[in-house]
Image: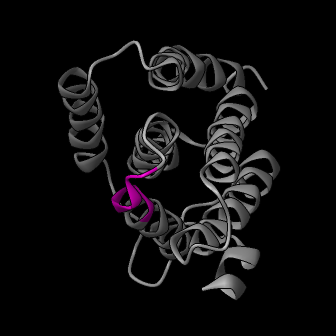
């Protein structure tokens, strides 16, 4: 049990400021991209699961990603003109909220945590971009890719069924 606490604290220490800055939009795009790139490089240097295997998950991660998957899928209706920009902004807020909840409650192993960085970074940055400019539909595709990457990399039966 003692080993779980440092992992949780490390994840919160690393991700909470990133989340806060991305969500509030205080970090500029170049700085945010550089910060995310450093996380991606750190994650790339870690081991990856063997072929055919996936990272383990915990309940907060599975629940958060389910909510994100629903919101990202719903953005397809926005792309087709079946909902207005206000609804798209609400979906972006939901995506950001689910990521914040995952960060606050996640207890992943360090390698899985590092792999998750590459998934939540585009979710946060693109949801924030959609919130700031609902007319920019180009931000939806990277969120779809992040959800698909999660389904490929993490052991979550609901994500596998949704693929």
Residue at the location (45% across, 25% down)?
22
**Could you tell me residue 41's position as x and y percent?**
20, 41
73 with respect to 1 (left or right): left
Residue at the location (60% across, 26% down)?
7
Q: Does 139 lie within the magenta span?
A: yes
Residue at the location (71% across, 87% down)?
161
Can you tell which quarter of the image residue 94 is in?
top right
Q: Nearer the viewer, residue 36 or 48?
A: 36
Which quadrant would the N terminus be assigned to in this image? top right
Q: Nearer the viewer, residue 147 or 46?
A: 147
**Could you tell me residue 36's position as x and y percent?**
29, 34
Which stretch did the figure color magenta? 135-140
59 versus 5 height, above or below: below
Which quadrant would the C terminus be assigned to in this image? bottom right
**Could you tell me residue 121's position as x and y percent?**
41, 41
148 with respect to 12 (left or right): left
8 versus 80 height, above or below: above
Colouring chosen for the image of the structure: one colour
Q: Nearer the viewer, residue 85 or 11?
A: 85
32 with respect to 51 (left or right): left
**Could you tell me residue 125's position as x and y percent?**
41, 39
Q: Main secondary structure of the magenta part?
A: helix
Residue at the location (67% across, 25% down)?
3
Q: Does 113 lie within the magenta span?
A: no
Can you tell which quarter of the image residue 157 is in?
bottom right
Q: How many marks?
A: 0
Can you tell which quarter of the image residue 101 is in?
top right
Q: Nearer the viewer, residue 129 or 84?
A: 84
């Amino acid at each position: 049990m003692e080993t779980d606490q440092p992992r949780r604290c490390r994840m919160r220490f690393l991700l909470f400021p990133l989340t806060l800055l991305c969500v509030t939009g205080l970090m500029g795009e170049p700085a945010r991209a550089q910060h995310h790139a450093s996380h991606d490089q750190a994650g790339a240097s870690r081991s990856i699961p063997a072929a055919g295997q996936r990272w383990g998950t915990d309940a907060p991660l599975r629940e958060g990603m389910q909510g994100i998957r629903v919101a990202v899928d719903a953005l397809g209706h926005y792309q087709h003109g079946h909902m207005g920009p206000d609804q798209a902004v609400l979906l972006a807020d939901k995506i950001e909220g689910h990521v914040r909840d995952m960060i606050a409650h996640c207890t992943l192993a360090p390698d899985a945590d590092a792999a998750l960085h590459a998934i939540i970074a585009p979710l946060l940055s693109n949801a924030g971009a959609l919130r700031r400019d609902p007319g920019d539909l180009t931000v939806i595709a990277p969120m779809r890719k992040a959800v698909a990457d999660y389904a490929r990399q993490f052991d979550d039966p609901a994500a596998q069924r949704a693929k």
